[in-house]
Image (cartoon, rainbow, N blue to C red):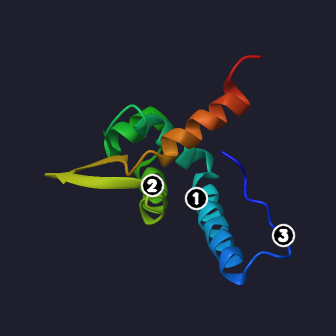
């Protein structure tokens, strides 16, 4: 996929469209820029998890996990589901998975 080329002869509408997409991308990157949120997304790639499961997997307090899940939910990256007293989370769509694959290629994969 080719990246867009910004130029001075671009129409205002086209520039505004690209600027809007840049704003969306920046919001997404801010949402995943926290280590705790990134680790939550890594765990959710394998499937739905309860808040309690995430606490155990992350060795983190419930308040910290809930705070990060709240941010991810506000950004539309995770979706909650209540089952009695338990709340389960899953990825809202494929964007986090694609991003994690890219991060893995850049930072984790052996040379």
As measured in the structure, the alpha-carbon distance from the residue carrying label 2 to the one carrying label 3 is 32 Å
Dot 1: within a 10 Å radius of its alpha carbon, few (fewer than 14), some, or many (20 or more) residues?
Answer: some
- Determine the secondary structure under disc 1: helix
Q: Which mark is residue 77?
A: 2
As measured in the structure, the alpha-carbon distance from the residue carrying label 1 to the one carrying label 3 is 25 Å
> x, y (%) of residue 78?
40, 53
Tell me whether the residue at label 2 lies in contact with that at label 3, contact meaning CB atoms closer than 8 angstroms: no
Quarter of the image with the N terminus is top right
Residue pushed farthest left?
84
> x, y (%) of residue 40?
48, 43
| Residue sitting at x 41%, y 60% | 73
As measured in the structure, the alpha-carbon distance from the residue carrying label 1 to the one carrying label 2 is 9 Å
Tell me whether the residue at label 1 lies in contact with that at label 2, contact meaning CB atoms closer than 8 angstroms: yes
Compared with 57, 80 (above or below) is below
Residue pushed farthest front?
9
Residue beneath disc 1: 28
Tell me whether the residue at label 1 lies in contact with that at label 3, contact meaning CB atoms closer than 8 angstroms: no
Compared with 72, 53 (above or below) is above
Dot 3: within a 10 Å radius of its alpha carbon, few (fewer than 14), some, or many (20 or more) residues?
Answer: few
Residue beneath disc 3: 7
| Residue sitting at x 45%, y 55% | 77
Q: Nearer the viewer, residue 33 or 18?
A: 18
Q: Nearer the viewer, residue 44 or 50?
A: 44
Q: Earlier in the sequence, mark 2 or mark 3?
A: 3
- Determine the secondary structure under disc 3: loop
Dot 2: within a 10 Å radius of its alpha carbon, few (fewer than 14), some, or many (20 or more) residues?
Answer: many
């Amino acid at each position: 996929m080719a990246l867009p080329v910004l130029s001075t002869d671009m129409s205002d509408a086209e520039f505004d469209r690209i600027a809007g997409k840049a704003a969306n991308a920046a919001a997404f990157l801010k949402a995943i820029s926290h280590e705790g949120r990134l680790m939550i997304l890594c765990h959710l790639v394998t499937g739905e998890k309860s808040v309690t499961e995430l606490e155990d997997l992350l060795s983190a307090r419930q308040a910290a996990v809930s705070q990060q899940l709240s941010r991810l939910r506000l950004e539309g990256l995770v979706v909650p589901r209540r089952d009695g007293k338990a709340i389960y989370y899953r990825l809202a769509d494929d964007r986090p998975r694609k991003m994690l694959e890219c991060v893995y290629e850049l930072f984790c994969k052996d040379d």
